[in-house]
Each structure stands twice: as structure tokens, then as C-alpha cells.
Amino acid sequence: MLYQDIKLCTIMMLSNLPSLSSRSIDMVIRTYQEMAEYLEGSNTDRFIRFFHAKVDKSSEVQVPSEFMKPDSRIRCLISTIAFGLGMQVPDISYIIHWGPPSTILDYWQEVGRCARNNKPGWAKLYTPPFSVNPKHCDSEVQGLVKLEQGSCLRRYVLRHLKIDNISHDAIDVCCGGESCCSHCDKN
């Protein structure tokens, strides 16, 4: 039941996207507070936590340690990119971005934390129009955000990563099929 509440709360918060579209510490704290307020009475501290570069020393150790346990009580972690570096958490099923990452490589690394357990994963990028500009992200990310339905997200990202010795033909073989990306699934 709590999982459904968290999912509903996330959807409700996304309807308020313009005020929650930054990738900042303030956004992390505000999102956590709004979710905790919505889920009041569900013992939210056990299930929802936040993490950013300026958390207290206790949280800096406790949150990653608890989150990485296979039987972790934390079901939803709201964080900045400060959390992910060096973390090996195999069972992350959902990654939601509020606002664009700075580069295609950042995006690929962030969504690459999802579904490391060979189960389906889901990553969603929400970007209000004002956040998709050169002050926040490079031209490749701007192109990703503007990609039309029917275009393969994975193919777009892989072509822009500039991986040595991988041709466009090799990328095309692994892209465009069912369960490739949210755009391919809708075709």
C-alpha cells in the first residue's frame, strides 16, 4: 500500500512541476517535505529518505548503508547526484529526473543505476521548457529532451556518447525493439 501512496504522491508532485524543476539541494528537501506531508501517518521516515552533498554526518553514513541493503526499509530516495557515485545498488527500479542533467554522459550514468538486477527498470525525465537551455544543459541534452515519439532514446544517447570502435550500425542493432526505451515501446 505504501508503494502505491508513494507513486500517487510522485504523480501529484509532478503536476506541480514548474516549482519542482531544479536539480538542487533545495529541491530535494522540498520534495521530501511534500512527500512526507502527503504520506503523514505512514511512518514516512522509515520509507522515504533524502540525500545530498550537505546532509549531516550521521545521514551521510546511514542513508547509503540502509539503502544498499537487499531488505532496505527505504523504498524511495530523493537525492542529488551526490548519492550515486560509487554506489552499487542492484534493485533500483525507477529513476525520475526533475530537470535535465548537464550532459548526455551524466544522463547515461544516472539512468544506468536503474535495473542492474536484470529486471525491467524505468527512467523518466521531466523538463519544463525554461530548464532546457544552455545554462542548465548542453545541446545534446536539449536534443534528447526534444526528441519526438518514434525516435529511439537509447540510439540517440549512444550515438552522442562517442564510444570508440562502435559504429552506428552496431548501435542500430541493439536499439529500436520492444522494451528498448519508452519511445520504442509506444510504436
Image (cartoon, helix red, strand yellow):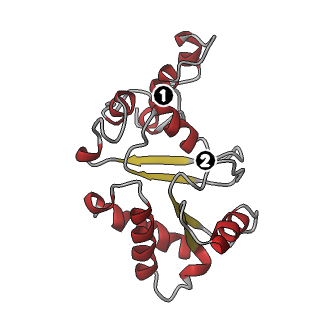
Q: Which residue is mark 2?
A: 114
Spot occupied by residue 3 in the image (x, y as percentages of width and height): 54, 70
Q: What residue is drawn where x is 72% and y is 61%?
A: 68
Between 125 and 181, the residue placed more toward the observer is 125
Q: Amino acid at mark 2?
A: Cys
Q: Which residue is mark 1?
A: 157
| Left or right: 79, with 145 as reference point | right
Q: Is residue 186 above or below residue 28?
A: above
Other-residue count near label 2 (Cα within 10 Å), few / some / many at <14 / 14–19 / ≥20: many
Other-residue count near label 1 (Cα within 10 Å), few / some / many at <14 / 14–19 / ≥20: some
- Residue 25: quarter of image: bottom left
Checking the image for residue 148, the label placed there is none
Spot occupied by residue 35 in the image (x, y as percentages of width and height): 43, 74
Spot occupied by residue 82 in the image (x, y as percentages of width and height): 56, 54
Q: What residue is drawn where x is 45% and y is 25%?
A: 156
Q: Is residue 92 above or below residue 177?
A: below
Callout 2: SS: loop
Q: Amino acid at mark 1?
A: Val
Q: What residue is drawn where x is 70% and y is 67%?
A: 61
> Which quadrant: the N terminus?
bottom right
Q: What residue is drawn where x is 56% and y is 68%?
A: 55
> Which quadrant: the C terminus?
top left
- Residue 83: quarter of image: bottom right
| Left or right: 187, with 16 as reference point | right
Spot occupied by residue 47 in the image (x, y as percentages of width and height): 59, 75
- Marks 1 and 2 sit apart, C-alpha to C-alpha, by 16 Å
